[in-house]
Image: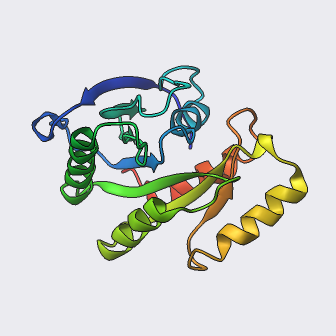
């Protein structure tokens, strides 16, 4: 994945505001405060293009970034933050479902989990749903900088048991490039830009 140009395109708060220009897309999904924005910033090699917050539940919309004028990186609202009002959680769910169901150019979803926590019930629901609608996905286990190498390997083995053998599972840290090229390579397999 060679990044030449990146621009923040827009924030989408409702289904009527999806971009008119249809491009191949890679979406990033995960629980609130799991590090989606940090992963996007590392992959795009742009500090702060995706806003990072220490408070969970801050991404309340779908954020579009246009890369090389050829495809979108799409940051979906984090799920599973219980302090957000139920009505807002329902709105997020509807917005995310509409984005996934009605996006013929969605090439894959990068599901981001915390390596220290693993896959929880809400991650499983997303995985099951993506499998049902036949949208490819990659699982990325972030925050590897928070644990030792031995525990990285151990936790990856544990997480692997919850996934089909064919699903890519990549450890990741947004603080260094140790696994960045591996994740870029996996995304490139799905993101065929003509």
Residue 151: image x %, image y %?
84, 57
- Whether residue 152 is situated above or below residue 121 in the rendered picture: above
Left or right relative to 109: residue 103 = left
Residue 12 image point, x, y percent: 23, 32
Quadrant of the image for the N terminus? top right
Looking at the image, which residue is at 14% across and 33% down? 17
Query: Which quadrant of the structure image shows residue 108?
Result: bottom left
- Residue 149 in the figure: left or right of residue 171: right
Furthest residue to the top?
48
Residue 92 percent coordinates (x, y): 27, 43
In front: 22, or 99? 99
Residue at position x 48%, y 33% in the image: 56
Q: Is residue 122 above or below residue 174?
A: below
Task: Depth check: give the residue in front, 25 or 118.
Answer: 118
Seen from this angle, which residue lies furthest left?
Answer: 16
- 92 relative position to 163: left or right: left
Residue 182: image x %, image y %? Answer: 68, 53
Total numbered circles: 0
Vertical arrangement, residue 102 with respect to residue 146, above or below? below
* Colour mapping: rainbow
């Amino acid at each position: 994945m060679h990044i030449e140009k990146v621009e923040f395109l827009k924030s989408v708060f409702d289904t009527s505001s999806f971009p008119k220009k249809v491009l191949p897309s890679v979406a990033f999904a995960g629980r609130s405060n799991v590090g989606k924005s940090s992963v996007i910033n590392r992959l795009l090699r742009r500090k702060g293009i995706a806003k990072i917050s220490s408070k969970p539940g801050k991404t309340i919309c779908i954020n579009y970034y246009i890369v090389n004028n050829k495809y979108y990186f799409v940051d979906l609202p984090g799920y599973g933050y219980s302090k957000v009002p139920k009505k807002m959680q329902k709105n997020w769910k509807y917005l995310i479902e509409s984005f996934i169901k009605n996006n013929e150019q969605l090439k894959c979803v990068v599901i981001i989990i915390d390596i220290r926590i693993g896959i929880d019930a809400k991650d499983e629901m997303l995985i099951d749903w993506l499998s049902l609608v036949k949208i490819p996905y990659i699982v990325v286990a972030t925050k590897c900088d928070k644990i030792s190498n031995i525990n990285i390997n151990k936790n990856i083995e544990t997480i692997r048991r919850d996934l089909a053998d064919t699903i890519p599972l990549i450890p990741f840290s947004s603080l260094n490039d140790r696994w960045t090229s591996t994740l870029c390579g996996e995304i490139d397999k799905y993101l065929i830009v003509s």
